[in-house]
Amino acid sequence: MTNPLRLAKALAASFMLAPAALAQSAPCGGSFSAFMQNVANEARAQNLPEAAINAVVNTARQDERVLRFDRSQGVFRQTFLEFSQRSISNYRLNKGAEFMRDYRSILDRARQQYGVQPEVILAFMALETDYGAVQGDFNTVSALATLAHDCRRPELFRPHLFGAIALIARGDMSVNETGAWAGEIGMVQMLPADILELGVDADGDGRVSLKTSIPDAIMTGARLLASHGWRPNAPWLQEVDVAASFPWERSGLDTTMSVNELARLGVSARQGALAPGNTQASLLLPQGRNGPRFLAYPNYDVYREWNKSFVYAVTAAYLATRLGGAGRYNEGNPDAGLSEDDMLTLQRVLEARGHDVGGVDGVLGAMTRDAVQQEQRRLGMPADAWPTPELLRALR
């Protein structure tokens, strides 16, 4: 009988050590069936088992729903207040407290082994799948094949298609597996190659199952965060009050200062105390100087590794503080923002002025925020990186 552990290690090794040149042997676009045959040839070159390769090739279908979701991610056009208030419900807060009680031992184990606080892991489980209740109904193999074949981001999804083959070969995934539209699986929504590399069999049943095993999901999620550079048991986000005299051009994730310097400039904790004085942090203003205000500590960078969306990362970090006992944020009274059409116009204007905004997509991402702050500074406006109708009028 084949030793499952030895097979798993062999599969992981063959997948992780495949020559980089092979990644280009299955180009995107063209005939889907021809693409999948190229995938099969590449998988054979990686020494993946023939049975798993054939199962994936015979199962994979182009899924137009996947492409529609990929093209219309309107959630990222919401403001922080809109997204966070829709996402942080009493159900998620109460369920998080329940998980904190019921799974205390495995959460403590994750903290001891990886240094990741329980509320951080649970916040991701809440936002991703409502603690496992809503894990997606897209066939994972077809979703990954569709996105690897599509020429928008093939380099992101192609490795995970081979990861799926490896997971199927070792028995940790079925060709009929379902999950999110972008190929993520389980309670913490991880992609196959990441599961192959970082999955933890925390319940000791010989399998890594992020769909059905809460211990596996908790420990694997913690290990993923640690792999992204999580600093053990350190803070990540904290709501603060800020004096009106603060130099707003020194806000934003690109500017870090010591907590001592921030305090000297008028930053104070709304609850509890700030981190030790030599800790580096950035003042984060999701909706400008008149909206909610947070200090982002070094661990906040890990949230951006998990999900590049600005509003998602801030919301996930803030939800973790709520699950850890923090109070509801002060909404403040943010200046009016821009409509989607005006945001598109602003990005075009900024590009015309020589700024790289990361594409004209109507999303207020990090690059657009940086360009906005630069123009606010140039125009002598409070440089808080929040685009307003006033700024757009001044730039036109």
Image: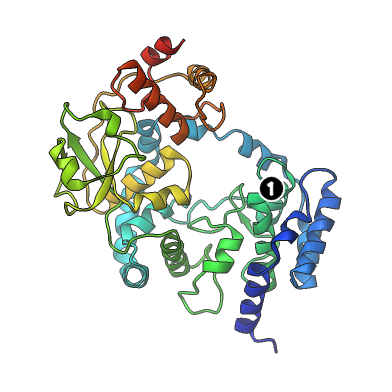
* Residue 218, horizontal then vertical, whole percent: 42, 65
Residue in front for this viewpoint, 262 or 82: 262
Q: What element carries label 1?
A: helix
* Residue 145, horizontal then vertical, whole percent: 72, 52
Quadrant for residue 265, please give it.
Answer: top left
Compared to residue 203, the image places residue 181 above or below, namely above
Q: Which residue lies furthest to the bottom in this view?
A: 1
* Residue 330, horizontal then vertical, whole percent: 22, 34
Quadrant for residue 49, please give it.
Answer: bottom right
Quadrant for residue 209, please give it.
Answer: bottom right
Q: Residues within 10 Å of mark 1 (few under 14, many from 20)?
A: some
- Going by the image, does 239 lie left or right of 63? left
What sort of colour scheme is used for the picture?
A: rainbow
Disc 1: which residue: 154
* Residue 271, horizontal then vertical, whole percent: 15, 45
Residue in front for this viewpoint, 130 or 241: 241
Residue under the point 82% across and 57% down: 38
Q: Can residue 269 be seen in this view?
A: no
Residue type, label 1:
Pro
> Looking at the rendering, in which quadrant would you find the N terminus?
bottom right
- Going by the image, does 2 lie left or right of 271? right
Residue in front for this viewpoint, 173 or 26: 26
Q: Is residue 160 visible?
A: yes
Compared to residue 152, the image places residue 41 above or below, namely below
Residue under the point 43% across and 69% down: 215
- Count of residue discs: 1
Residue under the point 65% across and 86% down: 3
